[in-house]
Image: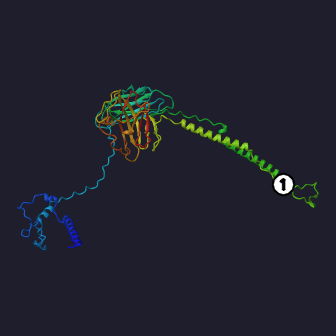
Amino acid sequence: MPASTRHHRALAVFVHCLGILAAVPALPTAAPEAAAAPRPPAATPQPTASAPRPPAATPRPPVGAPRPTDVPPSPPATVGPAATRPPVAMAARVTEPTPPSAPPAMAPPTRAPASAPPQPVTVTVATESSPAPRYRIQVRNVSGSTLDTTVRQELPPGSTTTAISGGGRSTPASGSATEVTWRLRLPAHSTTTLGTALAATAPGQPLTAPTCAFTSDGSRPYDCATATWQAAAPAAEVTEAPAWRRYPVLLAGLAVLLLISAAVFWVWRRRRRGRRVTAAALATGGGAEDGRGTIYPRPAAPSPVRRRRTPPVWMLVGAAVVVLAGVVGTAGWTATRQVAAIDTQKQPTSGAWMGTGVTGSLGVPLRESAFEFTVYRMTCGAPGTAGKTDGGPAAPVNGRRCEATVGVRNVTADHQLWHSELQRAYLPGGRWVSTDESATRMANLGRDVFANPMAAGTRMVLPLVFTVDGRDPPEQLELRSGVFSAGVRVHMP
């Protein structure tokens, strides 16, 4: 056999073997589950033509209903290749698992807006029109049971009380402030009226006195209100204006000034016109002593060219130097004043993106872009009394907790979120601390006041707790609704 023929035959055998190996995976095989499962016992034979399947049970018609007679009977099962199938393949089909269906698309859950629960005690404060500051406080129990409550009114720093009604007592508070305290027992659906009077102050100085009603132990506020007393402005005395400020006199003077200006303009215009006529006559040169002008006309002499007067160079240079010096001096003076007006101790609240920073005192409502904040009261414990709360970080060794009673009102038409990290208490030296979330939650009876957004138009009065170190209390509170909100600043007394 020639070598070429042997090579071709060997190549053909090799290609044939490759084709067989490639066709082996395409043969039908049993499923892995069926191969691993044991074969069914003989007591359960496969369906064949000799053993037809039992007919499916059909529901019986109700009694009295006509039986259908026009439905033809089902044909008998026929014996064919479709009736006999391999048992392994059938077992594989039966045991093949059905893939689970995809879960339905659902929208992510949204947090429901928080609304303040109705308080059983409400407080209103009003001022009276009097020469000295006087406040009228109404405490109303809207519940159906008798309640014990503690009412506290924060007085402005430096003020003294002259009269207190309802059995209240004046006690010194933190700093130079003073507070008036009442312990009341309010019957169901009753209203109690209290009053305080302060000593007269400097005229034109407003005095704000916030008032809050607390639980019997004074730990949790029910409601708070505030009012600002302002001295009645004295009646303005009507004095007659001087003669030179009366309208008829001013109009007459203006008319005389216009007449004088017109007369001066007319005289100046007439003199200028006379000078032009004289200059024209001299230029033509027609005189009576010159008799040869008509018979022997003189040739026209060329008029001398007059050079236009220009200011000297030294004057132009001097004026330019003076103008340049004035511009540079004005720019330097303006820049110096603007730099001197920068407050290096001021925190960057007014430079935020939304709104302008607002600053006020205790008890004054301050509004920013989304919320209206009112700080009614601030109390601090003794140094070293701040213990570790459940779930919170360890407090400093000489740390103490300062609790601020704050009223928050949503002044927008949408739900608004606010965050504990953005509420800050500033200490002396520029240091600040954020809200202690665990202590604030404990002060609010386990309720997280920052978890849900505030509903539109709602108002809440709640305590915010700050853990500070040192003996000095916070000097300012900074409250804001969002990161890009300018926020408000409240100066502590």
Residue 161, relative to residue 141: is it above or below?
Answer: above
Kindly tell me whether residue 133 is visible in this rendering. Answer: yes
* Residue pointed to by mark 1: 303
Furthest residue toward left:
43
Q: Dividing the image into 4 quarters, which one contains the C terminus?
A: top left
* Along the viewing direction, whichever of 66 and 93 lies nearer the viewer: 93
Residue 231 is left or right of residue 110, and the answer is right
Classify residue 50 by image quadrant.
bottom left
Residue 242, relative to residue 261: is it above or below?
Answer: above
User: Could you tell me the amino acid type at mark 1?
Assistant: Ser
Classify residue 97 by image quadrant.
bottom left
Residue 12 is left or right of residue 250, and the answer is left
At 60% across and 40% down in the image, what residue appears? 331
Classify residue 78 by image quadrant.
bottom left
Secondary structure found at label 1:
loop
User: In x, y percent, where is residue 379?
Assistant: 37, 30
Q: Dividing the image into 4 quarters, which one contains the N terminus?
A: bottom left
Residue 104, relative to residue 383: is it above or below?
Answer: below
User: In x, y percent, where is residue 223?
Assistant: 36, 36
